[in-house]
Image: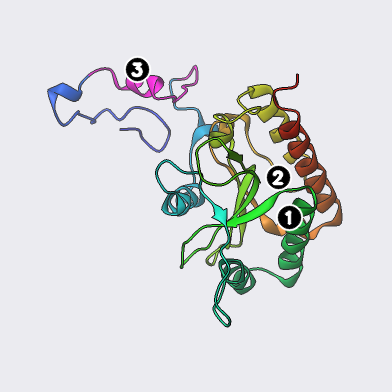
Amino acid sequence: MLTSEGRVSEGFRWPSEDEGGDVRSRLTADGIRFTVAGSADPVQRLTADDLALLVAEDDDRTEGEDPAQRTPSSSQGEETRSDRFFRQLTADDSPETVEAVRALFAHWEKLGGWIGHGAGQVTTSAFLMLGEAGAPGRGIWPMTLYPGGGRGGTAEVVFQYMAAREPFTDRALRTELLTRLNELEGVDIPEGKLDLRPNIRLSVLEKNHNRELFSETLTWFRARWEERGTV
């Protein structure tokens, strides 16, 4: 449909007359923005890593539920989901990154949050959760962490899901979150991904200043969640 330059392919044809119509108009209705030059806005382009993370998280989700449950206890000697997450992370990231993630989880729990894990065996995700698990809208999570599977671990910032949960239905709050994350060295999330789920390399947390900024951002997120409905 679109060329590598983001323009409508001259050779594109709809498979049937029922699906016809102006290609650019159809894509615009689906949320694709076009530049004045007529090409799709490059900041909305998804990379291979973006697509891989979308697939991985969708595998963890159950229709009608929030994506994580409190990690169930396991029988003696059985590997827990938390153990599996860190085993997978350790296989692909440096000891410094792994310890930074452990410290991040401890900080989140100190704030009153909890860590939920997806059920994936090949890639076990970890969700930074606030509120209750289960029914839609009763919990919120700013990001999901994934072991890298050969590419290095990532934190996926779930702007897409925040947009349906108070108080982050307010675009200004999501924009402030993006701005805070972009203060980390090595992070540059374009504003065009404010309705998507962009990712950050966990290796950026090896730097002390980045860890401090990240922790401050999570503290800010939790405070906005606690203030919901009071402003």
**Which residue appears at 86% of the width and 51% of the height?**
209
Query: How far apart are the two marked residues, 2 and 3, measured between alpha carbons?
Result: 33 Å
Above-or-below relation of 215 to 123: above
Q: Is residue 182 visible?
A: no
| Residue 112 highlighted magenta (yes or no) | no
Q: Earlier in the sequence, mark 2 or mark 3?
A: 3
Residue denoted by label 3:
25
Question: Which image quadrant: the N terminus?
Answer: top left
- Judge the density around disc 2: few (<14), some (14-19), many (≥20) Cα neighbours within 10 Å: some
- Front position in the image: 99 or 168: 168
Say which quarter of the image contains residue 78: bottom right
Residue denoted by label 1:
204
- Dot label at residue 151: none
- Front position in the image: 159 or 184: 159
- Give the residue type that dot 1 points to: Val
Residue 49, horizontal then vertical, whole percent: 51, 52
**Which residue appears at 57% of the width and 29% of the height?**
163
- Judge the density around disc 1: few (<14), some (14-19), many (≥20) Cα neighbours within 10 Å: some
- Give the residue type that dot 3 points to: Ser
Q: Secondary structure at mark 3?
A: helix
Q: Residue furthest left?
A: 17
Q: Secondary structure at mark 2?
A: loop
- Front position in the image: 205 or 123: 123
**Span colored in magenta:** 21-37
- Give the residue type that dot 2 points to: Val
Above-or-below relation of 169 to 109: above
Residue denoted by label 2:
187
Question: Which image quadrant: the C terminus?
Answer: top right
Q: Is residue 144 visible?
A: yes
| Residue 34 highlighted magenta (yes or no) | yes
Residue 33, horizontal then vertical, whole percent: 47, 23
Callout 1–callout 2 Cβ contact below 8 Å = yes
